[in-house]
């Protein structure tokens, strides 16, 4: 990134720096071009799972290989896959809801939040945990309200039965309680 923006121009002639510069520019542009963002997400999802697995395996060096790689696959790969799936789902939902015109808001919010949480995690870890927890709770609340609105908003004619009429989730969401 530094070679892209003139801090170390003397090294820009090297092939590695030009490739790094190209990757940085493509990644930044990808946040703001919906089809490119979705294409890169399709590559990033399996890469995130592999990276999460390898990083977690590198932490458990004293464990037996069976325990080490089992934990790495379940904890590291699973956590990385869950986060990446949530990110991809959010961007896909934004693309569908706004025809791609709202992706820049989601991408900018993601970049700002990840930067703030990274700095907080280094400077004041307990506040970072609190902020991350608040973001998760806010996401659950928004998701709950959205699900409630989507399930309860369908208007049906007098001759047709409502969808999921006997479904316990619809009943629970309608009454404001989870089963």
Image: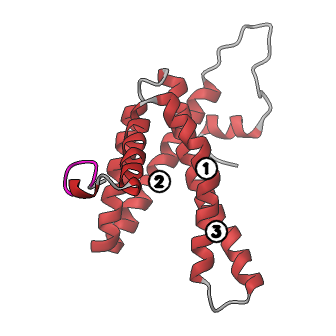
Residue at 49% from the left image edge and 45% from the top image edge: 141
Q: Nearer the viewer, mark 2 or mark 1?
A: 1
For the residue pair 126 and 168, the one nearer the viewer reads as 126
Which comes sooner in the sequence, label 3 or label 2? 3
First of labels 1, 3 by sequence position: 1
- CB-based contact (under 8 Å), mark 1 and mark 3: no
Q: Which residue is mark 3?
A: 53
**Residue at which label 2 appears:** 137
Dot 2, crowdedness within 10 Å: few (<14), some or many (≥20)? few
Residue on which the image places disc 1: 45
Residue 130 placement (x, y as % from top left): 38, 65
Residue 92, above or below 12? above
Q: What residue is drawn where x is 74% and y is 85%?
A: 65
Q: Label 1 crowding class (10 Å Cα cut-off): few <14, some 14-19, many 20+? A: some
Give the side of residue 146 with respect to residue 107, left or right.
right
SS type, badge 1: helix
Residue 76 position by quadrant:
bottom right
- Element at label 3: helix
CA separation in Å, label 1 and label 3: 13 Å
Q: Nearer the viewer, residue 93 or 45?
A: 45
In the drawing, does residue 8 fall left or right of residue 51? left
Q: Nearer the viewer, mark 3 or mark 2?
A: 3
Does the image show residue 85?
A: no
Q: Quadrant of residue 154?
A: top right
Instruction: State which region is magenta.
Output: 3-8
Please tell me whether residue 6 belongs to the stretch shown in magenta.
yes
**Earlier along the polypeptide chain: callout 2 or callout 1?**
1
The residue carrying pointer 3 sits among few (fewer than 14), some (14 to 19) or many (20 or more) residues within 10 Å by Cα, namely many
Q: Going by the picture, which residue comes out furthest to the left? A: 7
Q: Residue at x 44, y 61 (%)?
A: 133
Label 2: state its secondary structure: helix
Identified at 57% across, 49% down, the residue is: 44
């Amino acid at each position: 990134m530094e070679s892209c923006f003139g801090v170390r121009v003397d090294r820009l002639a090297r092939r590695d720096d030009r490739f790094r510069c190209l990757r940085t520019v493509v990644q930044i542009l990808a946040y703001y071009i919906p089809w490119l963002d979705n294409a890169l997400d399709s590559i990033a999802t399996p890469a995130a799972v592999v990276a999460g697995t390898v990083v977690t395996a590198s932490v458990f060096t004293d464990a037996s290989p069976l325990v080490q790689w089992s934990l790495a696959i379940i904890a590291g790969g699973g956590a990385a896959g869950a986060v990446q799936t949530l990110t991809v789902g959010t961007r896909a939902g934004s693309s569908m809801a706004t025809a791609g015109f709202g992706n820049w808001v989601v991408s900018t919010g993601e970049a700002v939040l990840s930067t703030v949480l990274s700095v907080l995690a280094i400077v004041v870890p307990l506040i970072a945990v609190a902020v991350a927890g608040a973001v998760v709770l806010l996401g659950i609340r928004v998701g709950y309200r959205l699900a409630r609105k989507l399930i309860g908003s369908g208007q049906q004619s007098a001759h047709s039965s409502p969808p999921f009429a006997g479904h316990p989730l619809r009943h629970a969401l309608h009454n404001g309680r989870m089963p």
